[in-house]
Amino acid sequence: MLATLGGCAQVREPTGGPVDETPPRLVLAEPPTGSTGVRPERILLSFDERIKLDRVRDNLVISPPLAVAPDVRVTGGRTVEVRLNAPLEQGTTYVFNFGNSVLDLTEGNAASDLNYVIATGEHLDSL
């Protein structure tokens, strides 16, 4: 009986499954993108998978530019936190274009075309 069981096991490396080719997808934003009449101290962007940041200082374009650069970091593995270090101007629409700075953790697929828009006034200006 031992001879029968000994011949069944094969030693080999695990296959690891298919390569992840899907970029992270934004599933929740706080405040929600498109919000008006908001002046947050921080912005949270949550994704459907674990993420990392790549050259966020080079890739993140904020329009209009902020007086003081925000602190940007990953929290909880799936969320980008943008901590604003100065109040936003009243009556202004802000666009945060992350470029290719948000990547999935395993394969480095970029969440391209990631834009976040809010307005401190009562309406969004045309973009």
Image: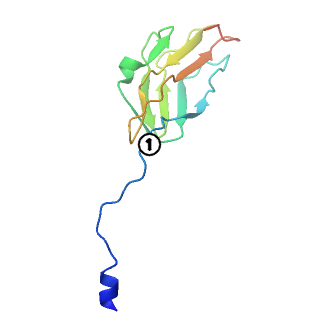
Coloured how?
rainbow
Question: Label 1, on which residue?
Answer: 20
Residue at the right extreme, as displayed: 122
* Total numbered labels: 1
Tell me: residue 107, above or below residue 59.
Answer: below
Between 68 and 77, the one nearer to me in the picture: 77
- Where residue 50 sits: x, y (%)? 46, 41
- Where residue 77 sits: x, y (%)? 45, 41
- Left or right: residue 92 versus residue 123 is left
Please tell me which residue is depicted at 67% across the width and 17% down the height of the picture: 36
- Where residue 32 sits: x, y (%)? 63, 27
Please tell me which residue is depicted at 56% across the width and 13% down the height of the picture: 94
How busy is the neighbourhood of tag 1: few (under 14 within 10 Å), some, or many (20 plus)?
A: few
Q: Secondary structure at mark 1?
A: loop
Between 84 and 79, the one nearer to me in the picture: 79
Please, what is the three-letter code of the amino acid marked with disc 1?
Asp
Quadrant in which the C terminus is drawn = top right
Place residue 58 in its image quadrant: top left
Place residue 119 in its image quadrant: top right
- Left or right: residue 111 versus residue 38 is left
Place residue 52 in its image quadrant: top left
Residue at the bottom extreme, as displayed: 1
Quadrant in which the N terminus is drawn = bottom left
- Where residue 55 sits: x, y (%)? 35, 24
Please tell me which residue is depicted at 49% across the width and 42% down the height of the picture: 49
Tell me: residue 119, above or below residue 101.
Answer: above
